[in-house]
Image: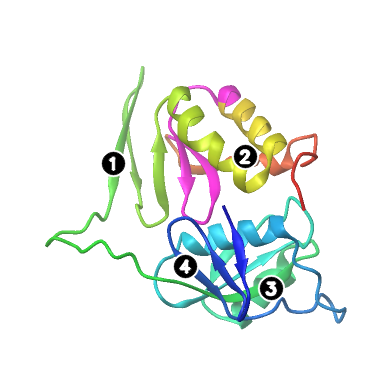
Amino acid sequence: MLRMIPGPNVLLTALTTVLFLGLPDSLAGQDSPPVVPSLYRQLAEAADGYRTGKETFFIAMPTPPHDVRGPFASRDEAHRAAATAGRRFAVYGPFIASRDSIPRRGSELVSVSLRFRTNRGDSVVQINPREVDALFFSLSSVDKFMIPYYVQVRGLDYASRLRNQIIAFGSGPTCHWARTLPCRIDMTGVQPLPADSMKGGDRNQRN
């Protein structure tokens, strides 16, 4: 559940506080586009994926499906990304997500190895846990944990198309990028699941 707090544009998610310290920049000299609730949800979730206590910026389209991209460490870097995105992207930020309060106990997870076996032999793919923060090894786990999340953040139509694409992909883990994007893993590495590009639009996503 995402709600706005009166005052300096503070976004709250269920797990952490995300401070939105700026207004969206203008698009090609036009007035700043309105920030609809569905975009606030996606920006807050994306910023929440980077709980560093430092400022981050994102780019996104003002209207659904928004296609939030980032994070970027500076406004200038975000503007350069928006200029090359090829569509009507605006810059949003800065955001600050509070640091995780879980203490480290003398060790740090730096890599996860997945071993794939085929008729030609084994192949190992290395996963960066700072980028991929969840792995799903069955459709049951996708239905329990991944699909409900995307229904909340992106809408029912998007989540339904995403599930169909996961089924079409077949065997192999499904994953979640920390920047709030679904992904898949095969022997070539981590690949996005571009549900935004599938037919049907986000008809069930509320503004």
Taking the view exactly as shown, the residue that stands out farthest to the right is 30
Q: Nearer the viewer, mark 4 or mark 1?
A: 4
Residue, x 13% and y 60% (percent of image)?
A: 105
Q: Nearer the viewer, mark 3 or mark 1?
A: 3
> Which residue type carries mark 1?
Ser
Q: Nearer the viewer, mark 4 or mark 3?
A: 4
Is residue 166 placed above or below 182 in the rendered structure?
above
| Structural distance between the alpha carbons of marks 4 and 2 | 21 Å
> Which residue type carries mark 4?
Thr
Residue 17 numbered tag: 4
> Which residue type carries mark 3?
Val
Instruction: Return the residue at label 1.
Output: 113
Residue 151 numbered tag: 2
Q: Position of residue 130 (x, y in %)?
A: 37, 57
Q: Position of residue 96 (x, y in %)?
A: 49, 74
- State yes or no: discs 4 and 1 in contact (Cβ < 8 Å): no
Q: Secondary structure beneath disc 1?
A: strand
Of the image marks 3 and 1, the number of the one nearer the N terminus: 3
> Which residue type carries mark 2?
Val
Residue 91 numbered tag: 3
Of the image marks 2 and 1, the number of the one nearer the N terminus: 1
Q: Can you tell which quarter of the image residue 159 is in?
A: top right
Of the image marks 4 and 2, the number of the one nearer the N terminus: 4
Q: Secondary structure beneath disc 4?
A: strand
